[in-house]
Structure formats: structure tokens, C-alpha cells
């Protein structure tokens, strides 16, 4: 059973909104050099979709968002698209699965456990795929830790601060219910 009760239509609309937000939101950040890697604006709607709509919608959002963004805006560039697509797919999938199965009895704790678990899983997959497939031989543990954690620290903090607040706001406004 999903934590949030919504019909299929509502889930599809929210997932579509998250995909659209994932295409548009990065545009505001990419006027600043390297802002996408620092603030991770595309990650927010994908994680939100997985947590609220469930893993099938989160997975679809994680695949479609970077693909459509790359087609329509050129971001991410084609060279980075495969690894980013896999990373975001994992975010949507894992956030939805963890939110479905984590049951502490406290919504905020379930949200943070699911969010952090998904963020770690996505970064791990991103690093492994780059090391083994997409940039084999040119990717190291130092490059991964720098890209996934040091450079991305502002984005990680933003995700941890904003996503639970957004979900609690949606719940308070009765757009989603437990």
C-alpha cells in the first residue's frame, strides 16, 4: 500500500507536473556556470515524484525528465545523458520503494529515510556506471566523491530542506492524503 492515497489520474497529473518542472527548473540555474552540478535542480522533482506518487511514476519521471530536457533544452548534454538518466531513474525508483515500505510511524522520519536512501542509491549507481561503462578508465573514486558529494553539497542540502517541506505542504493542503 502506498503511503499517499491518490487515484491514477491524480498520480499521472502530478508525475507529468514533476517531469515538466524537471525540464523547466534547471533553466533558471544554468545561467550560472556549473550550477546544474552544484544545485541539482532536476533531482528535486524526480525525488518528489517517487516519494509522493510511488516507484512506477518516480521511475518514469526519472527516465523521462533528463531525456526530454536534453531533447528540448540541450541539458544535460548527450555525453552526460546516459549516466544522469540512470541516476535519476534510481532516485525515482528507490524513493518510491522506500516510501512504500519504510514505516516508522512518523511521516517526517519516513520521508528523510526514503529521501536519503534514494539519494545514496542514485549516487552509487551514477558512480558505478561511470566507472564501469560510461567513463571506464577515466573515472576514479576521487572524481566520484568530488562530483557526488563535495560539488553537489549545496544541492543535497536544498533537497533535504525543500522536499520534505513540499510534501508536508501538499499534505496540509489536502492535495495528497495518507
Image (cartoon, rainbow, N blue to C red):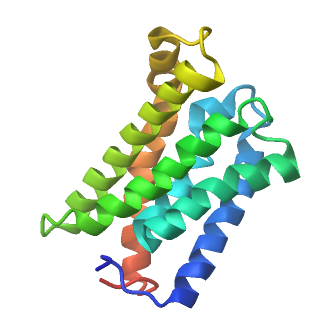
Q: Residue at x 47, y 91 (%)?
A: 7
> Image check: 133 left or right of 70?
left
Of all residues shown, which one is farthest toward the front?
Answer: 133
Front residue of 97/146: it is 97
72 vs 124, left or right, is right
Q: Where is residue 153 drawn, in percent x and y?
A: 46, 29
Q: Position of residue 23 (x, y in %)?
A: 73, 55
Residue 11 vertical position relative to residue 135 in the rendered view, above or below: below
Q: Nearer the viewer, residue 29 or 62?
A: 62
Write down the quadrant of residue 168 in the picture. Answer: bottom left
User: Where is residue 10, by image quadrant?
Assistant: bottom right
Q: Position of residue 2 (x, y in %)?
A: 32, 77
The N terminus lies in quadrant = bottom left
In the image, what residue occupies the spot 39% across and 56% down?
95
Tell me residue 174's x, y (percent): 41, 87
Does residue 141 lie above or below 120 as drawn? Answer: above
Report the number of discs. 0
| Residue for point 46% across, 63% down | 50
Q: Quadrant of the C terminus?
A: bottom left
Which residue does the image show at 60% across and 24% down from the upper left?
Answer: 133
Amino acid at each position: 500500500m502506498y503511503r499517499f492515497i491518490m487515484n491514477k489520474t491524480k498520480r499521472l497529473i502530478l508525475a507529468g507536473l514533476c517531469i515538466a518542472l524537471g525540464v523547466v527548473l534547471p533553466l533558471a540555474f544554468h545561467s550560472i556556470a556549473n550550477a546544474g552540478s552544484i544545485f541539482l535542480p532536476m533531482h528535486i522533482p524526480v525525488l518528489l515524484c517517487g516519494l509522493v506518487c510511488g516507484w512506477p511514476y518516480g521511475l518514469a519521471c526519472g527516465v523521462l525528465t533528463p531525456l526530454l530536457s536534453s531533447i528540448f533544452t540541450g541539458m544535460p548534454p548527450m555525453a552526460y545523458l546516459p549516466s544522469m538518466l540512470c541516476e535519476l531513474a534510481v532516485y525515482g525508483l528507490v524513493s518510491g520503494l522506500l516510501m512504500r515500505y519504510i514505516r516508522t510511524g512518523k511521516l517526517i522520519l519516513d520521508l528523510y529515510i526514503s529521501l536519503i536512501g534514494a539519494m545514496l542509491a542514485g549516487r552509487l549507481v551514477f558512480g558505478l556506471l561511470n566507472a564501469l561503462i560510461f567513463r571506464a578508465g577515466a573515472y576514479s573514486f576521487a572524481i566520484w566523491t568530488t562530483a557526488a558529494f563535495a560539488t553537489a553539497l549545496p544541492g543535497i542540502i536544498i533537497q533535504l530542506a525543500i522536499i520534505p517541506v513540499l510534501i508536508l505542504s501538499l499534505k496540509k493542503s489536502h492535495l495528497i492524503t495518507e
